[in-house]
Amino acid sequence: MGTQESAPLDVARLREDFPILSRTVGDDTPLVYLDNAATSQTPNRVIDIFGDYYRGYNANVHRGIHYLSQEASIAYEQAHDRVAEFVGADGREEMIFTKNTTESINLVAYAWGLNELSEGDNVVLTEMEHHASLVTWQQIAKRTGAEVRYIRITEDGKLDMEHARELIDDDTQMVSAVHISNVLGTVNPISDLAQLAHDHDAYIFADGAQAVPNRRVDVKDLGVDFYAFSAHKMCGPTGVGGLYGKKAILEDMEPFLYGGEMIRKVTYEESTWNDLPWKYEAGTPLIAEGIAFAEACDYLDDIGMDNIQAHEHQLAEYALSRFAEFDDVTTYGPGLGEDRSGLVAFTLDSVHAHDLSSIVNDYGVAIRAGDHCTQPLHDRLGISASARASFYLYNTREEIDALVDAVDAARELFADI
Ligand code: PLP
């Protein structure tokens, strides 16, 4: 829900930062980009980082004492501090750069899970996990003999916290929960889950892929042990993501990948590990991407995360109210007036989600259709697929009207078949 301190966004001005938004698609149709939960667009100042880096100071980090390497190393290290600060972590030692949210989850699952889990242990997930978390923990559990448990969702798409209290017990080693569902838009009570996990000496991992782009996140306030997110969903580039981990835990854990960069001393018999976070960043890292990630944080902070959250909330409310005009449209997740993120998954009775997204595409409207990497959740909802419109700081009500008109057109087209 919008916060009281938020100010309206000057969307027309902000759109000028994103050259891609003024392009046309197909038959010279203006682009209406409503697929931001998959990947957001990139503002000029983040794009410019790549030109600056490759034209100005491209060099490998931590491997040379020449000027370029020093400049690249400093920029790359400072980028860790900046991204850490953005989510409330205590500096670079608690912020590992990975490829994306998926790799951040895999890093912990492999480095911690494979070593620590065994038969008799359990890992508690939610029914609304993205495959990035669900498949990863499921596979690590299979290899270690641990059990995977799922916290139920209620009819209105929230977590059943009563069930969470039943499932999390003294054999629980990890609770891994999505902070904001990429289908339902539900904002999960991560602090409550963290408390429950810690009461049973378990760790908590939150998947923040849909939260960090859209609202102020403070990992210390949330009380999590690990937290994952991706730059490409928050005005940053593809190819880089963040993993927050509590320093003491990261120090204890084994590395995930081995090789250069992550070592301190190597002999033919033994190796020791580098300081945090480099211990978890083997090989040449994502240098330009990491620096651009930090620039994206600056960009979002300049706009104000509270303002972005309020704007998205208004758009989600508007979309829900427009869809409520139609008896044959079903929306999923918390309804009007509730705390939810700026995405709306929906189905239209007479048209399959894939056909729907293909027809609205003819009208220049980009939405996503399918299971959105949540097949078990779709089974649970009793549907094979849904369409999803997801909004960001540069979207407008007029674009939601364009979507609703395009959905109308799809309905009419199928009525004639
Ligand atoms: N978790 C959630 C909730 C997501 O929405 C996504 C992306 O759609 C992911 C994880 C995976 O993100 P990535 O593909 O950047 O690893």
Image: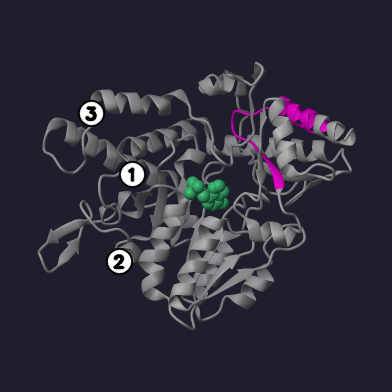
Asked whether, in this view, residue 157 is left or right of residue 5, the answer is right
Task: Choose top left, top right, bottom left or bottom right for residue 68.
Answer: top left
Q: Residue at x 75, y 55 (%)?
A: 383
Residue 158 included in the magenta stretch of the image: no
Residue 276 lies, in percent from the top left, at 27, 55
- Residue where numbered disc 2 is placed: 254
Q: Secondary structure at mark 1?
A: helix
Circle 1 crowding by C-alpha within 10 Å: few under 14, some 14–19, many from 20 = some
Residue lying furthest front: 417
Residue 145 lies, in percent from the top left, at 47, 79
Q: Amino acid at mark 3?
A: Tyr
Task: Choose top left, top right, bottom left or bottom right for residue 75.
Answer: top left
- Residue where numbered disc 3 is placed: 57
- Among numbered discs 2 and 3, the one appearing first in the sequence: 3
Mark 1 or mark 2, whichever is nearer to me: 2
Q: Amino acid at mark 2?
A: Glu
Label annotation for residue 81: 1
Above or below, 367 against 219 in this view is above
Asked whether, in this view, residue 396 is left or right of residue 46, the answer is right
Q: Could you give the CA–CA distance between mark 1 and mark 2, rounded to whole angstroms?
A: 23 Å
